[in-house]
Amino acid sequence: MKKTILGFAVFVLLILSPLILAQHLPSGTYRPNRERTYDIIHYKADIKLDWKNKRVVGESTIRLRPLSTASSVSLDAYWLNVSGVRELSAGKDLKFNATESTLDISLSRTLQPTDTTVLQVKYTATPSAGLYFIDAPTGDQTVTTISTYGEGGIHANWLPIYNEPNDKFSSEMVVTIPKPYTAISNGKLLSTKENADGTRIFHWYQQLPHSNYLVALFVGQYVPVTLRPAFGIIPLTVWVPPGQEDEARRVFERTPDMIEFFSNRFGYRYPWDKYDQVSSYDYAVGAMENTSITGHNDRIMRDRFQLEEFNPDFSHYTSNWTAESIISHELSHHWFGDNLTSRSLGTIWLNESFASYCMMLWDEHRLGREELQAQTWMALQAYLNYVRTQHIIRPLEYRFYDSREEIYNTETTYLKGGIVLHMLRWILGDDDYFRALGYYLHKHEFSNVESTDLKTALEEATGKDLRWFFDQWVWGGGHPTFEASYTYLADQKKIELKVQQVQPLVEGQGLFELPVEVRIDANRKTKREVVWVQHQTEHFSFDVDGKPDLVSFDGRGALVCDLQFEKEISELLYQLEQDELPGRLWALHQLVQRYASNPSTLSALSNVLSSSAYWSLKAEAALQLQNIHSPEAEKLLLDQLRSTDYHVRKAAVIALGYRFTDAAKRALRRVIDSDPNNDVAMTALVSLSKIDRSLTVDYLESHLRRTMWYDVNRLAVLTAIQNLADKKFLPLVKEHASLKYNYAIRQQALNSWAACAPADPELTDALMTFAKSDILPVQTTALELLGRLKSERALPLLDELARTNGDGDVRKAARDALQEIQRMNTR
């Protein structure tokens, strides 16, 4: 075991800063790579779908070979009703034993590793996870759709299979469904057959090997929308409900450009037969990169006037997750994730961190360097804020967890991981970095990988020793906190820069060692020097032509670090105007935090907002006006409601939600009624609910009658009700705790209900219903609320779900709720 992860339980605080709170790694069960006893070569699923009973009738044909002498085989099979197993290669029926989680099969003879056998399993399943029957409301009717999601080992709820990612095989999917439904799966469509009984059979074939969780099936009333073929030969199709064809062409129009960009950037051509994308109602996750067929939650669909962000979010003006970044993220998995696949969840950063950085690379390619800097800066702030508030750090490669959600942590696995890769790019340089990643892809194509495989490939391609980097950033946890200061020595024409590392130390892990770019502006000249920080305290000396106007520490935002650097207001004002975007954003925050009452700060923010600065700096300036408490600041904030950039307007309405003035209330009401962007208008409604307790049922109900993308108006009304927490709004809330609305609405309705009437017995009934029968996001929300509200009546249900649900995350959420209620009873 590497020394950098020996201290997975205890942290030692430095006495350097009394403000530092203890940090810790998330605890959990140790999860080594699963040992295999056989290798699946090909998997064929022949299934019929019982729509009425939400049941799968299946016949799986599995060609495999043992990895050692074997007389039996055990498949993962969660609560499958197995009726028979036959060894087709021997022509014999086999003895088997089906448990709650496995199908144990006795072979007709002892096999050697040089042998192969073909097994056929007949079964039925009523899956509680992995495959979802979902009723999509369409006007006054509902249309049943089916979708699959397999991450975290949940496909065994509907397929007898090896349920870990460290095996790869080709696959087939033969699906019998009634007309007029269409079935879409991995690979090529070999045939479609029309039966006399009104059913259709779709036969899909995936030739190149992939892991079990990437097997996919989508069924619905879909029509194909054909995009330009990538490189003129790779077919690209978007599948959407009828009537959404024009939206699909617009939303997904850049997909062929993305495929060509990633292929060229990494020197590795997109390898799969085709690329399909499906808009699936209430898809259980935002999106999923199934091999050659990405499933998208239907909120990906929008008209040209909707927000860029993928999710409605009333708390921030933007995020790393735009609709386009979701599309590029899932596509890039077809290099990092579907082709090169993490051997286990413990190393899932090799999938998700890469895809997160790839979406930033696409933004850089299409929108320029400042967009990349804005994306990496936002990712860094999200990660640092997570550590500050949760006090949790962990390595990117980490094997102690009890649910997949713990290891799929957005702030660490996705965002920190992405900017760690960005930092490595800066350290290696573009030429070496992208050439080495191409080498990594070619060397390990269609195989499983671990962090050491990446490290070795990068070292082989560049000739560099990267052990230090992986020790710190992959196998080590946390990040450096730098405390910087400098002294100008006028008589020597030098500055002396002092840098200290003041972060908490992890037991078994030393200080960070990394390069830092220092920019010095003096006498109208700019110089940049790279220094290596290796010790707790470092001193660096630089020649200068005069007193510096600016000493910028990592102003380009290449590093994953927190910076404490006290500066005079004059230097911060200069940095806000002259540094690169990450340095300007940092200076903006420092001005507001340290000099909020200084008139020069407000003047500087006003200058930014009236300038041609990049949109992210202007939006951040508008947001930070909430921290300057003066009539002049409020007037400047109100002026931003006329900005042509909706990010700036949205930042302004969020900031107005912290001002309890009549002017703020009147302005928010005007925005609610008149802003052309629905997201801005509804964010204003949520902000208004924070400062105006006089909102009435009639007022909120009037906004329910508006028609908006993804029912964002309903989501905003429910969020406002949660803020107001008043029983008078219960009728509006209860109406939305219904399957007639998308799952984001159902989730918010439950949270709002709990805020307004936590003791309402009808709430407990609703929570128990959703915990048992809804999809994952709503289930886990309901379970969390049952625990928080100490709903003893739910104890039998929680016990049942903790034992029998097919999704490990649901089982853990049920266990957590049980423990929360039981703790109350022991006090």
Image (tube, rainbow, N blue to C red):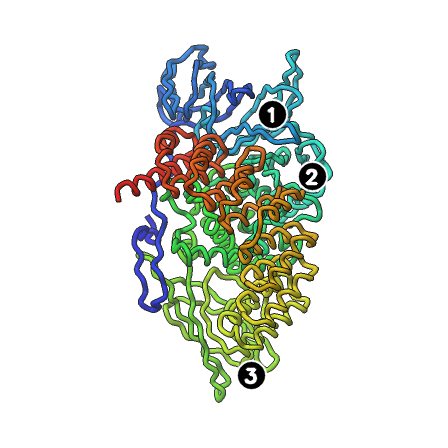
Please provide percent x and percent y for residue 228: 72, 39
Q: Amino acid at mark 2?
A: Ala
Q: Residue furthest bottom?
A: 491
What is the count of numbered marks? Answer: 3
Q: CA–CA distance between discs 2 and 1?
A: 23 Å
Q: Is residue 49 above or below residue 343?
A: above
Question: Of discs 2 and 1, which sits in the foreground?
Answer: 2
- Which residue in the protein does label 1 denote? 204
Q: Is residue 316 left or right of residue 307?
A: left
Please provide percent x and percent y for residue 6: 31, 51
Residue nearest the viewer, comparing 487 with 690: 690
Residue lying at 70% horizontally and 49% vertically, measured from the top left: 305
Question: If the image is split into quadrants, where does the C terminus sit?
Answer: top left
Residue 367 in view (yes/no): yes
Residue lying at 62% horizontally and 55% vertically, measured from the top left: 364
**Crowdedness of circle 3 by 10 Å Cα count: few (<14), some, many (20+)?**
some
Please provide percent x and percent y for residue 347: 43, 44
Q: Is residue 777 above or below residue 357?
A: above
Question: Of discs 3 and 1, which sits in the foreground?
Answer: 1
Q: Is residue 383 above or below residue 141?
A: below
Residue 545 numbered mark, or none: 3
Residue lying at 50% horizontally and 34% vertically, measured from the top left: 775
- Which residue in the protein does label 2 denote? 248
Q: Secondary structure at mark 1?
A: strand
**Crowdedness of circle 1 by 10 Å Cα count: few (<14), some, many (20+)?**
many
